[in-house]
Amino acid sequence: MELQRNFFIFIFLFLSFLLWQAWQDRLPTKNKTDNTTTSIFHVNQTKEDKSLITIESDVLRLVVNMYGGDIEEAILLNYKDKLNSSENLKLLETRSDFVYQAQSGLIGKDGPDNSTNNSRPLYFSKKNFFKLSNNKNELRVPITFVGKNGVIYKKIFIIKSGKYDIEIEHNIYNTSNKNIELNIFGQLKQTIKLPQDRDIYSGNFALQTFRGAAYSSMDEKYEKYKFDDISSNKNLNIITQNGWIAMLQQYFVVAWIPEVNSSSNLIYTSYVNNDAAVIGYKSSLINIPLKSRYVIKSKLWIGPEKQQEMAIVAPNLDLTVDYGWLWFLSQPLFKLLSIIHNFVGNWGFSIVLITFLMKAITYPLTKAQYVSMAKMRKLQPKIHELKKNFGYDKAKMSQEMMALYKKEKINPLGGCLPIFIQMPIFLSLYYMLIGSVELRHAPFFLWIKDLSDQDPYYVLPVIMGLTMFFIQKTSPNHISDPLQKKIMNFMPIIFTAFFLWFPSGLVLYYIVSNLVTIIQQKYILSNFEKKQKM
């Protein structure tokens, strides 16, 4: 097998996999569902209804609607909206054509968010702006609502320096003369159709990742749930102890994590207002005796998919960094890349170094590949003789060919094995580049400002095509069929076109890999020729 034919097989399999994955994302999810609508409420305040407060730390700025105490806007202060943009990334926001909110409250017979009221409680705050001081590690922001029955409901937002997990603490002071019953809920609501200014990868199939809901339960450590299923009213209705619910997008996640306790929670989804998906949780019934105080907590992660930090916040939350079915390769590969980055300080050079390392590890396979190719080329006269003598009898021809391979000690599949070893590495790096937030907007040098995005000037894909063309021309070649030769000559052009849309970090990997291959090829074939002459 020639190297260029192997490369053709490799790219064909890779592109077929991407298309298969895109098709899978369109299929319905098989899961425990209930076609009844289980979301808590569907109240929409107008702009005139809003009373807002702002809470700010060193990494987050939150805008809270005092009607219900929902977080209607969350800005990540350490992340830009787009490359070279002066605006910070808005992860949560509320506008006329797009809504993405983190909602929470108390429902049930005595809950102020009871859906039968068709309204949200209006909380009170002493100020409308709160900021974490530089010399403080924690900021507590309380908002208060007093019900008609005299019960005091206090909702406290607790944010910490440098942290993306927010603690939401509900304090219920039952000052009434009877027991009260309620449930706590937390849900995420998002418009399914993205407005044009938010869908930055709409035209690039190679950079698209999963966008939708996800959850963790006792039975499933991590399960994605598509917006298409939610909009089809295939609603989740799962009873579980602990767990979490989330909404995912490339590099960032918002997740509700209920308080860890012995009681059970209901995980649900619903489709509201004919345009928005909801995933949430509802606790089991809470009974609060008269003249007593009850405290229940939950956590809300709003931020980048930082694996180590998320693993501490909640079990399995780090699995939202979705590396696909090759996660067992992508995760250690990313850890290795991070170690290299700690020394060199540049993700692009880290990719270059890890490519050298991968090529060194796979060198024995590469050597076997080129030796096999060289032997096959040398064997062509004998193969042509066999075709002349036994071409009319395919069974006899195959038998004689295998006997010849055995006599010459040639493995006819020796040229294919390295490509199947390299493909998982290539795919793992691909998932790592489009799934690791650390590589978002990571520069290399000169015009390459974002290794996770395509080369804006297509220079790297062209260089990759040239290296592929050089390998094609210098590799041992025994193709005699004119049509096959023509196809092989067009291959560098075809695959250069494919690579135009791939992450520039991935193209960089393949350029370096090809350059190392050229050096290894020359060295291996030179030594082989010397041994043959001896």
Image: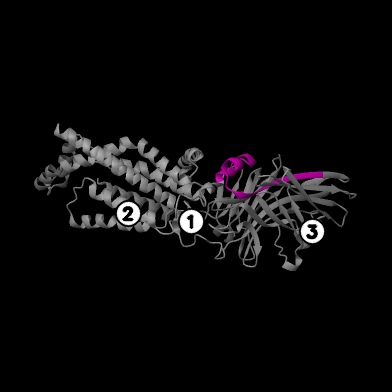
* Amino acid type of the residue tagged 2 in the rendering: Gly
Which residue is nearer to you in this view: 66 or 257?
66
Look at discs 1 and 2 and give the one toward the viewer. Answer: 2
Image spot of residue 71 (x, y percent): 70, 56
Location of residue 412 (image quadrant)? top left
Q: How crowded is mark 1: few (under 14 residues within 10 Å), some or many (20 or more)?
A: some
* Amino acid type of the residue tagged 1 in the rendering: Gln
Q: What stretch is highlighted in magenta?
A: 294-319
Q: Say whether disc 1 or disc 2 marks the residue closer to the N-terminus.
A: 1
- Judging by the rendered image, the residue that carries numbered circle 1 is 208
Look at discs 3 and 2 and give the one toward the viewer. Answer: 2
- Residue occupying the point 36% across, 48% down: 511
Image spot of residue 1 (x, y percent): 25, 45
* Amino acid type of the residue tagged 3 in the rendering: Pro
**C-alpha separation, residue under disc 3 versus residue under disc 2:** 62 Å
Query: From where the camera sits, is residue 470 visible?
Result: yes
Image spot of residue 239 (x, y percent): 65, 46
Query: From where the camera sits, is residue 46 visible?
Result: no
- Judging by the rendered image, the residue that carries numbered circle 2 is 465
- Judging by the rendered image, the residue that carries numbered circle 3 is 121
Secondary structure of the residue carrying tag 3 is loop
**C-alpha separation, residue under disc 1 versus residue under disc 3:** 40 Å
